[in-house]
Image (cartoon, coloured by chain):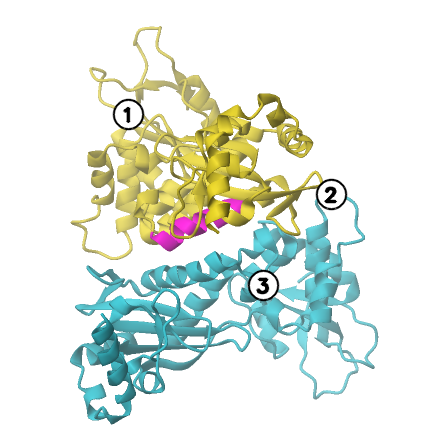
Chain colours: A yellow, B cyan
Amino acid sequence: MEDHLFSRDVAAAIEISRPEQQLGSDSAVQNLLAWFKGQANLEDRFGYVVRQSIDEVLDGQRTGRFDIKQLAKTEKTYLGTKVEIVARTEFGLGDGQRMDYLVAGHELDSKFTIGANWTIPLEADGHICLLIKANDRKSRYQVGLLRICSEFLNIGRNRDGKRTLSTAGRAAIQWIVPSGEIPENTLLALPESERLAIFHASSTYRGSGNGGQLRTNELFRRVQGRPVNRNTVLTVASQDDSPKRVRDARNHLRPEGILILGHQNQHPHIARDLGLPVPGKGSWVAVRVTQADGAESTRRTTQILGQHYMIWREGDPAPVAPPAY
Amino acid sequence: MEDHLFSRDVAAAIEISRPEQQLGSDSAVQNLLAWFKGQANLEDRFGYVVRQSIDEVLDGQRTGRFDIKQLAKTEKTYLGTKVEIVARTEFGLGDGQRMDYLVAGHELDSKFTIGANWTIPLEADGHICLLIKANDRKSRYQVGLLRICSEFLNIGRNRDGKRTLSTAGRAAIQWIVPSGEIPENTLLALPESERLAIFHASSTYRGSGNGGQLRTNELFRRVQGRPVNRNTVLTVASQDDSPKRVRDARNHLRPEGILILGHQNQHPHIARDLGLPVPGKGSWVAVRVTQADGAESTRRTTQILGQHYMIWREGDPAPVAPPAY
């Protein structure tokens, strides 16, 4: 046992001397790389996999949580399993015999981390790993491939006998997506004061059932010009019918000159006219507007019910939203 | 440390001598018991908590799984966390300072098991636990309360230092629901041959996108007279729009004399007429029917578009479903 450890350590110490070309000569890794790179909309789909997995484990609708830091240890561990499942479905990956996946005829293990490095169990030695790393705060993720060998692992082990990737190991990763974007976690991205204002919007309300609506209204008052997705509304509202909460918010906020644009009706058209992100399905963009008559001609406008509107700015006349849109 | 261990073991050995009356004298446990027993539809709601938690972790829509046995170890561990979250939301339980919940002014820990016994960590000593046990195969669950003390724990420990409840501990549980019913896990309850026929209904199909529909059709051919819920359809179809799959199955199965009744239109009325379970929202009941004209008058019938129908039996004329319902 001691001898074995020693030989691994020596191997780790000489990792730098490993010929570079050897990295590219692993045909299984190259086949897998080609397979993944051949998938349509690769970056968006891995971004979706990460966003969806994090959101499902946060379970914001039930728990009000929006930050991985709020997860219990068992939930953080499970997050890796959820990523494995969602990636499998998203890319139609087969079941491996010995490892998680079978892709392009090769067995492949899934390893996910929200930290700075991956932890690799002893039994992964010789396996090819699909390494996924996510930073929800920075909205960035990475996906790559690496065949694990002792030279690519640091010497220290944690309690479970797992080891982290060494500098040489990280350098040897064949990147599928070296730097991808996770759809923004709206609540996490907000300043603390804004978030508290949204979650506390119902704190003085003592009736039943309507607190979620007050919080949804406050969400669209404070988050404007950026897409707000279904999960964010569910997390804020703690209710399951997010489209209904948004429809009601639309009525409640109209007197304040706020539009909430979705993906239906003329909404995408209005968003494009005003230079806003165009909301996809299950996503909304709020914006405060006012009538554009007589304003300087350089500002973008949109026509609703025969009247021109532009995005409201400080100094404009009071915000006014159209009666219907 | 050794001494401490010894004293716990001695305490465990003399557990039988503990006066019975002491069990009932714990006012916190009695308050909690009264609080839970005062909740409306207590049994149905705990049954829902267990069903929903298991179904979410199985993630049948993505994985095709229907049996807890198919879960990985991390998922089984996480199932306890999911039950804790779903129960919290269902009953509006507060967050504890030191434990999971704060209910009626008392701190309360959540402990879930799918096995024969609960495993209790050392740090739970003195805590009141909400003990939930589920057997999905038997569709039964139990919920009870117990203040943990060393007398109620067996001597042996597992690797994490956890101990199981002793016979005396199990006898001291104050039951909230001593024997409740979990909504049936339709796929788990089916004989293996029926299940395989459903999942393999698409195996000779080589087109794209329609395999889920073929499996959904087979589900309603083989599961009749019993409610089939949304999750079962999602698991069989591996697609997210279960109502659409069911609507299409309704059209595909009409030529075979099969009705698929939902909760809308005259469907509940038809179900009642025929003595079938009445489908709730997100649930359907399939049944093979034929025209009832001239049949013996003892059989239940229902009228659809001016024509009488009854449940088809062996020996009846060929099954015939109405053209619309």
Q: Are marks 1 and 2 on the same chain?
A: no
What residue would you read off at disc 2?
Answer: B208
Q: Quadrant of the C terminus of chain A?
A: top left
What number is the disc on residue B227?
Answer: none
Residue B44 in sight in this render: no
Cα–Cα span, label 1 and label 2: 49 Å
What residue would you read off at disc 1?
Answer: A320
SS for callout 3: loop
What residue would you read off at disc 3?
Answer: B66
The magenta stretch is A72-86
Which numbered disc flags the more N-terminal residue, 3 or 2? 3
Counting other residues with Cα less than 10 Å from the Cα at mark 2, is it few (<14), some (14-19), or many (20 or more)? few
SS for callout 2: loop
- Between residue A250 and residue A225, name the one nearer to us: A225
Left or right: A136 as drawn, with respect to A197: right
Residue type at numbered disc 2: Ser
Q: Is residue A253 magenta?
A: no
Rendered location of residue A2, percent (x, y): 46, 49
Q: Residue, x 49% and y 25% (percent of image)?
A: A16
Marks 3,2: beta carbons within 8 A: no
Residue type at numbered disc 1: Val
